Image (tube, rainbow, N blue to C red):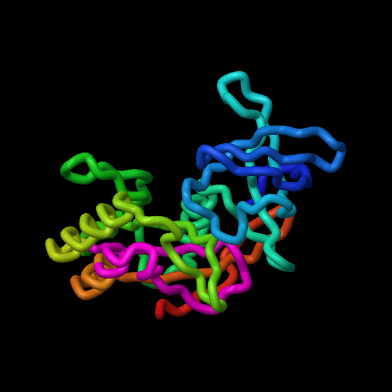
Amino acid sequence: MRLPGPLYAGILRQRYKRFLADVELTDGRLVTAHCADPGRLPGLAVPGARVWLSRRDDPKRKLAWTLEMIAQGEALVAVNSQNPNRIAREGLEAGRFGWAAGWTELRREPRIEGGTRLDFRLTYDGDRPPLFLEVKGVTWKRDGLALFPDAPTMRGRRHLGVLERLAREGFGAAMLFIAQRRDVEAFRPAADVDPAYAEALLRARSAGVWVGAWRCGINQSEIYLDKKIPVV
């Protein structure tokens, strides 16, 4: 996936109200950027971090600037929460996911009974039932592992409950974690942050929901699927 360019380098001065970040650009300007990731971004959204922003001049937008990447040591971490779905779609269209092979129609954000929306519905020819897919972006790293969530998530637990029900009803169901960084070797649910989410993920897997994780390669022009990593 191509990142919006050009990107503007700067230093993070503060992140506040979850979705706002004040950044000092290299030319000395202080700008306020939209931070699309609602999580805590531990170890990332810290004052003094090197960051990169995109700019879009659209009169419908409240903020022209968007926080795209944060450096953590030598690693670049993408923090735009819109990326994972785009990356997953590219992977589906390129046939990178064997568990989804053979689909004939891809629909975004299908509405499930009860008003819940998942990220994708894949339709197949013949008697194979549709497959429903939810995608979560991961930015947090600890002890070499990609971890999710970095804050308690009732919405995430609800998505897992819907996937579990769909799997028990005979539909295909999958949960895909996409780590927007390359310096991780495996994925694990953060049970110490949200034990209910970890339990819900275990129940979903036991019910037949496919659970997988990939890490991404990233540079200042693109982010792409690099390698499947184990779920531990």
Residue positioned 59% across, 65% down in the render: 216
- The answer to whether one can see residue 23 in this image is yes
Q: Is residue 27 magenta?
A: no
- The answer to whether one can see residue 127 in this image is no
What residue occupies the far top of the structure in this picture?
Answer: 59
Q: Nearer the viewer, residue 16 or 84?
A: 16
Q: Is residue 112 above or below residue 133?
A: above
Q: Nearer the viewer, residue 167 or 193?
A: 193
Residue 63: x %, y % from top left: 62, 28
What residue occupies the far left of the structure in this picture?
Answer: 169
Q: Is residue 53 above or below residue 139?
A: above
Q: Is residue 176 magenta?
A: yes
Task: Point out the stretch of residues depicted in magenta.
Answer: 172-199
Residue 140: x %, y % from top left: 53, 63
Query: Within the image, what quadrant is residue 42 found in?
Result: bottom right
Residue positioned 64% across, 47% down in the render: 68
Residue positioned 40% across, 68% down in the render: 190
Q: Quadrant of the C terminus?
A: bottom left
Residue 160: x %, y % from top left: 27, 59
Q: Is residue 93 left or right of residue 165?
A: right
Q: Nearer the viewer, residue 27 or 201?
A: 27
Query: Within the image, what quadrant is residue 26 found in?
Result: top right
Q: Is residue 64 left or right of residue 97?
A: right
**How many dots with numbers?**
0
Residue 127: x %, y % from top left: 18, 63
Query: Within the image, what quadrant is residue 136 found in?
Result: bottom left
Q: Is residue 190 left or right of residue 79?
A: left
Residue positioned 54% across, 50% down in the render: 83
